[in-house]
Image (spheres, rainbow, N blue to C red):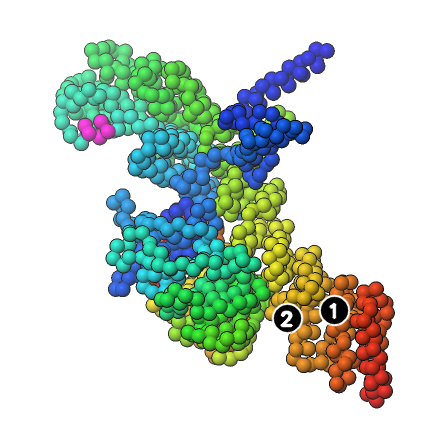
Amino acid sequence: MNISGFSSNGLMEKHLKRSDRAKTFVLPNKCFEKHIACAWRRGNNFTIYPRSQTVSKNQGNTSDNKILKVRQEILLFIPILRKLINDSNGVFLSLQKVAENTNSDNQVEFWKLSRQYRSIVRSIIENLQEAAEEESDALTKNSLNSYATIFYSIECIWHLCEILFIKNIPGDVVLPFLLEWVCCHFPSHDQTAAQLLEARERGSEDHPEYWNTVVSLIIQGRIDDARDLLRLHSDSESAEFKLVANSLRTMPVYNIYGGISSGEFTIVWKHWQAECRAILNSQSLSSLPYLQLIMRLLIGDYTAFESICSKYPSWFYLLGGYVLFTRPWSRRRELADAAAACAGLGAAHAHSHLNTVIRALLEGDLHQMIYEIQQMSDNGWFATHLTDMLYHCGKLQVLDEHQTDMTKRLRDSLVLEYGSLVMEHGALWCTGLSYLAACPPEGPRRAELLLERLPLDSEEKAMRIIAEAKKYDLLGVARGGGARWRGAGRVGAALAWAGRARGAGLCAGAAHAALRGYCAGAPLPAADMLLSAGPTLLMDDTLLLLGKYSDFHRLYNNKEFKKAAKLLISLITSKIAPEYFWETLLLDTLPLLESEEPVFSSTETYEILLCLELRAKLLTGEKADLLRLACARNLARTVLLDGVEE
Amino acid sequence: MAQDGNVKVTFVSQKIKKIRWIPEDYAEAQCFFTGSWDDEVNNIKVWILDYINDNEVKYPKDVSTFIVEGNVTEIQFTSKNVIAVSTSDGKVRLLQISEYERKTPLKEAFIWNNLHKIAGRACPCTSLATMEGDIATVGEDGNVNILNSRRGDITRTITEADSCSLHSVCFIKHNEVITGNLRGHMKIWDLRSSDNKPTNSFLFGGDQLATTCIINHPTQPYYILAGSESGAIAMWDLRVNTFPSTLKSHPSGVTEMKFHPENPNKLLTSSLSGELWEWNMEAVMKNTKTTENWIALQDKNTTPTNTLLESFKPLNSFDCNKGNILVAGENEAIHFIKNFKY
């Protein structure tokens, strides 16, 4: 009992969780009061229509019967972001190509491609900002700006990801890159610093932001700039200033190529920090709170970081500085503590989405990170491309609850989803296809289904689709295309398409249509095609008959009666003609039987007679009698001749 | 994509089917036309190469747009400032661009509606060719129309010129056009004769694949080159009735072929497999002449080609003007190649 109760609880929980993620939309004007039904269209489109199980007795309320077409609004399809789709597609394909050959240099290539992705995102942000500036409509402007914000955080996360997982960092010492990341994405007091350093005036401390700027430079690791700025203070010649400046100057910087081991460096570093601590403890700076603050930062004093935290919008600004002054030799995998410490500094602004993602990244929890970035409203562009990148770099390890490796499945499902989404756009099917093709075996199957459903408005497009399908070996797609021609009475085109598709059924259908048309009195179609079709004719018996029959007409019109007769007899004796065509075939022998010069031999005439008798039902009455008579007369002429010829 | 310094890529958010420089008399062209296809709304755009944001490099910027229904299938000049545009709804338009101010919108000088139709319904006009004011159009209905761009009338229609759909056309002389169909069946038509029979016809190859483009040699017009859906490129000497000599072929369909306007020995070809090739035709022509239209097997692979551009996606169209080449394709980008040696 207990167990069942527990499991049902679990189900409920699961159910709740799921319904959390489902979104509810209210249909306008309550248009469907009673029964509705829904049908899927291509892609993420569906149609809702009223449907009643019972036949409505009062016809009065039919007026509010509407059909609603519901589709997903896809952000990526706005013109600016279409550039992103196409541009990134090129990089994606390069990446797949690089991943194919297992070379030791791959890591460098991956890093280059990752930078390309980022530069694409950068240029998209620029484009979005430009467009927003030019836009006069406030609403559009607003949404353009919010798109720019989305892509801004994408670039920021990608950059960190690149540092932590993609880039090949010698010795794994991540600090310089981390500082670069902070400077790049979370600059603070940049302009003030530039201004002050440009002006080079003594007494710069009059600037209201002077001290904040100095502190900012220090926590960004721009120690030299900070010293320059300190020199511009009017008291810079005082002993206290010199003391601090000296501490800054002597700060050891770890360099993997510097020739000292990390152990040695640790000793040097600890020694330096001990010196700093001694200065601080000597109370010599007690009258100068800002210098004191700087020294406290230098020794990695947590309370010092806490005290400046409120001046920055988020803890990311402090991350670089914190690592710099606490554990400058940190390796990539050792950043989680620093992240936790920094995040603890200012609980007030720790709940943003970006915060969660960056925490997950620093903790090395890629699964969590991917889960989070999937929630971003970029239609999965970021999650797909980043996951694919990490997957190929071999940095992604995702295990499910049974500890089986789900990495490939995760990557595939994201790529497939994105590919299908892109394929929804009428013009981008080719791009979408390249994503689907990158995850065999499911991708190509999906692609086949989607390709077949693409609307065809011209042969050109059909040919393109077939060419693309061929590129990815999707052989199922080549069919179709010809059917619409048969309807339009263009037998030649229908046959040509059927021949391309190598579809015997299509060939037969088109050939039957042509033969029936001919029986009904239409001229024999597509002579130019049939006479030059070559091996295509062998695809189907009826088509072969049509081709040869067309050839018979040509011979007959050229007055080559002997050859024409031979061909006709072979058509009759091969018995490949459909029933409805026998009459035509047999009657065609009439003029040849009645010609002045006998063209049929007696044996051939017997064949005709035999067919006539075997198919008595198909040719009756006067026509049959006429044919019999003609045969008899021809026999009379040829029976003796044959003997002579032999 | 590997980019060297001479190629600039601009993404334009539309798939460009045809791209054409607007030639200037004594200078390098600065403006060009593009025609898009396979999108919800397709258009003809005029672009100007311009410096954007104080950059030192010129990038294309669109200055005017002309919306068309259906897909653009071909753009050709009929005179210096007039282009003929065919679309997949069976129409052919003459569009005029102002000679002095390229930014003014295009003016529609003439339109032929329903030029190509099957059983009364419009069907795509697949291609057109121009020669001194005459326009030859072909369509999926298998008809050939000869239009006069000055008078705006249809001078001649060859109905049922082909039972399949026609996909390429080219003027050989004033009174002779050559067409290629879905199966690679090529026919030559004498426009003076009144019966709808071709004067000559031959097959591209046995594979029954479409002829996607036909051009003739600019100085020796009896040399005809045709590109096929299979990627093969073949050359005929119309003076002698022999088999074509097939040149080296692209891995997939040829989309456009063009001789460089300033150098008839330079051929450029683009393909669905995404390459733009440059050919040194001097060697090819010499080869075919000495060996009587037959390239010796050992020479076949040494046909002098050079890859100018490679893309993952099909390249649809290109155009050259002096040392500048514009290439556009399915990746919705315009590639601008500078300093091409012709």
Q: Nearer the viewer, mark 2 or mark 1?
A: 1
Q: Which image quarter: residue A225?
A: top left
Question: What number is the disc on residue A507?
Answer: none
Mark 1 residue type: Thr
Residue A251: % across, % down: 29, 25
Q: At numbered mark 2, what does the secondary structure look like: helix, strand or loop?
A: helix
Where residue A35 appears, as percent x and y from the top left, is 62, 27
Q: Nearer the viewer, residue A462 or A178?
A: A462
Q: Position of residue B110 (x, y in %)?
A: 38, 59
Chain identifier of the residue bearing label 1 in the image: A
In the displayed structure, would residue B136 be above or below residue A597? above
Q: Residue at x 78, y 63 (%)?
A: A579
Q: Residue at the location (42% across, 51% down)?
A: B68
Residue A139 visible within the image: yes
Residue A531's mark?
Answer: 2
Of helix, strand and loop, which mostly describes the magenta segment?
helix
Indicate whether A247 appears above or below A198: above
Range covered by the magenta-colored residues: A191-196
Image position of A322 (left or right of A5): left
Residue matched to label 1: A584
Identified by mark 2, the residue type is Leu
